[in-house]
Image (cartoon, rainbow, N blue to C red):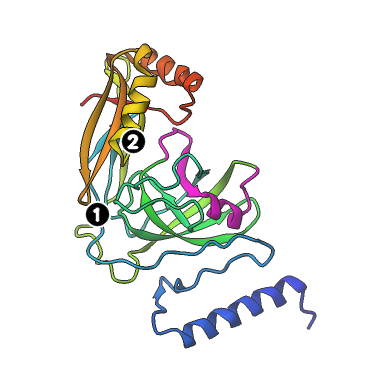
Amino acid sequence: MRVSARNISVMMVLACAAMLAACSSSAHVVRGLSVSAPVIGSGSSSSARLNRTGAGEQKIGRPYTINGRTYVPARDDDYDEIGVSSWYGPNFHGRPTANGEIFDQNELSAAHPTLPIPALIEVTNLENGRTQVLRLNDRGPFARDRILDVSRAAAIELGFLQQGTARVRVRYLGPPDGVAAAGSVAPSRIIAANTATGRFRVQAGAFSQRANAEALRRRLSSQGDASIERVRSRGRNIYRVFVGDDLPRSEADRLSRSLGRFGVYDARVVALN
């Protein structure tokens, strides 16, 4: 029987995975996949790794509204969706994620708007066939045509760093080792809001140090009501900088785009609840 080079490569990867599972006491299997040691592409120079430490229980969070859409987080064990993924990196490196971890663009991680966090997900780039297990620990993306944001390292492993976006399949695997699963199970939902009558403001940034938030607030003071709001996330303070208040959607969109002149390229339009 003729064996193709691709089949030989697949057999070698499976053999290596089996050896890792046998040698590691921390290996575990989720939905038939060994997620103890994600495979790093042999042609990549990335030193990325999957952060598998954890404790406590998954967090779900309350429904929230951003960019005129309401997101209803939920534990969704059957989540298996196809859509567009983008990636994020330098602008968020070192900042707290939605569950309080520190985002590292060199880790194999991802952001999703509704699935519980932290979690493990399997992401397949449908344009080149590459698959990677990622740690989900953040919220986003909030663009209407995207279902996932991955770290820079994950974009390298999935092969779409230069391309910017890719069509992917996202499959929920469950919580990481040491983390208890969230309670009830229900489909996660995204609800389109009526933006014609809604009121909005713009979040220009979020910082762990108030001094950095104050510096941005002063820089943006000429663009309207610039303010800082403090929130608590996993025992630490986060300072969010907002510009504008009680704006119609069209004005908030224009204000968000105009902040690029001040070096702010990741501003978000946030609905007032």
Residue drawn at x 49%, y 22% as measured from the top left? 260
Q: Is residue 257 above or below residue 50?
A: above
Q: Is residue 136 magenta?
A: no
Mark 2 vs mark 1: give the one in front.
2
| Residue 178, position as x, y percentages in the image | 29, 71
The answer to whether residue 24 is seen in the rendering is yes
Badge 2 vs badge 1, beta-carbon distance below 8 Å: no
Position of residue 58 in the picture relative to residue 139 (left or right):
left
| Residue 170, position as x, y percentages in the image | 46, 54
Which residue is at the front of the view, 85 or 243?
Answer: 243
The N terminus lies in quadrant:
bottom right
Query: What residue would you read off at disc 1?
Result: 59
The magenta stretch is 141-162
Q: Counting other residues with Cα less than 10 Å from the Cα at mark 2, is it few (<14), some (14-19), or many (20 or more)?
A: many
State the image quarter where residue 46 is shown: bottom right
Residue drawn at x 45%, y 46% as measured from the top left? 93
Q: Is residue 245 above or below residue 114?
A: above
Whichever of labels 2 and 1 marks the residue nearer the N terminus, that label is: 1
Q: Is residue 158 magenta?
A: yes
| Residue 237, position as x, y percentages in the image | 23, 43
Residue drawn at x 59%, y 81% as measured from the top left? 16
| Residue 90, position as x, y percentages in the image | 51, 43
Query: What residue would you read off at disc 2?
Result: 206
Q: How many marks do you count on the picture? A: 2
Which residue is at the front of the view, 115 or 255?
Answer: 255
Position of residue 125 in the picture relative to residue 225 (left or right):
right
